[in-house]
Amino acid sequence: MIDDVRAVPREKIEFYRENGFVQIDDVLSPAELEELREYLSETMGAEGGRSTATDREGGAYYKVLNQRVNTWRDHGGMARFVLGGRFAHIGKQLTGFDGIRLFHDHALYKMPGDSKPTPWHQDWPYWPMRETGAFSMWLALDDVDESNGCMMFVPKSQRIKNLKSVSLVTPEDIFGQAGAEAADRNTAVVVRMKAGSCTFHDGLTFHYAHANTTDRPRRALAIIFMADGTTYSGASHLCTDGLGFAAGDVLKGGLFPKLA
Ligand SMILES: O=C(O)CCC(=O)C(=O)O
């Protein structure tokens, strides 16, 4: 397991709490990065299994993201990285939560060819949670910049609540929603990173990813974590449907393990 506990510098914690995102460099060693690339490639190429590919080649969503949810349920090597506590412990320090549970992971490839940007959105409105605070770790498996799908974040936009989810395929302008007036896209921070580095962002932080204009996939792994004690809202979601949760139940159990 990738489960060592790393101390996060105070200024990184303060930056996350103030701005709703932070960049953490070199969370994987070169050897770990190579190992994860191999597992990810095996997972993305596999048929069947317990993970879910959200679209097929040629589909509108696929042009935004070639995505596979819950790779850890398919591949022991992916589980080594996703369930290992390294990322969860960084998230625990950033958020200050008493405990951190896994919500899900997803492999996020931005494919070459007819690539579309990931439009500006917040993540939390897609998640079936009553409490805010859940967050994502987004790990670059390739060097990323504006040419192949690096992310941008609007600082302090995590303070904006009660917006509606936007479609990633036929994008609606989130900045035009009532309640979003305080978010200014002109303040967005472009986050270029080396492979093996990552960002953490709050589920409410406005973010965007550029289209991939190169001739190779942009590979990323994102892991979504939530505070221990987060409760189910009752909304439908791929990761909770059919599991018997009632609105108000704590999200826990074997598919949502406590990792930190
Ligand atoms: O990888 C991308 O293009 C977007 C990722 C994203 O929106 C997220 O991880 O929340």
Image (cartoon, helix red, strand yellow):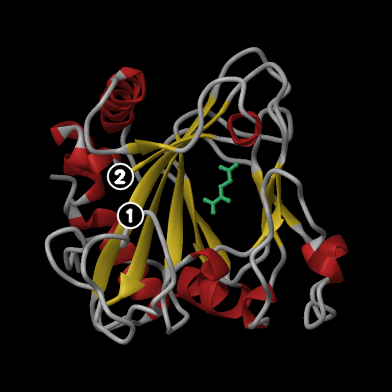
Q: Quadrant of residue 147?
A: top right
Name the residue type under label 1: His
Please say if the residues under marks 1 and 2 sit with CB atoms less than 8 Å apart: yes
User: Dot 2 surroundings within 10 Å: few (below 14), some, or many (20 or more)?
Assistant: many
Residue drawn at 64 percent across, 65 percent down? 165
Q: In the image as oriented, which residue stretches furthest toward the top?
A: 215
Q: Nearer the viewer, residue 236 or 187?
A: 236
Residue 24 picture location, percent across and down: 46, 54
Residue drawn at 38 percent across, 59 percent down? 224
What residue would you read off at disc 1? Answer: 104
User: Dot 1 surroundings within 10 Å: few (below 14), some, or many (20 or more)?
Assistant: many
Asked if the beta carbon under badge 1 is closer than 8 A to the nearest atom of ligand 1, the reply is: no
What residue would you read off at disc 2? Answer: 70
Q: Nearer the viewer, residue 194 or 51?
A: 51
Residue 255 picture location, percent across and down: 18, 58
Name the residue type under label 2: Asn
Q: Which mark is residue 190?
A: none
Q: Could you tell me which secondary element the residue under label 2 belongs to?
A: loop
Gap in angstroms between the C-alphas marked 1 and 2: 6 Å
Q: Could you tell me which secondary element the residue under label 1 belongs to?
A: strand
In primary-sequence order, the first of circles 1 and 2 is: 2
Compared to residue 226, the image places residue 106 above or below, namely above
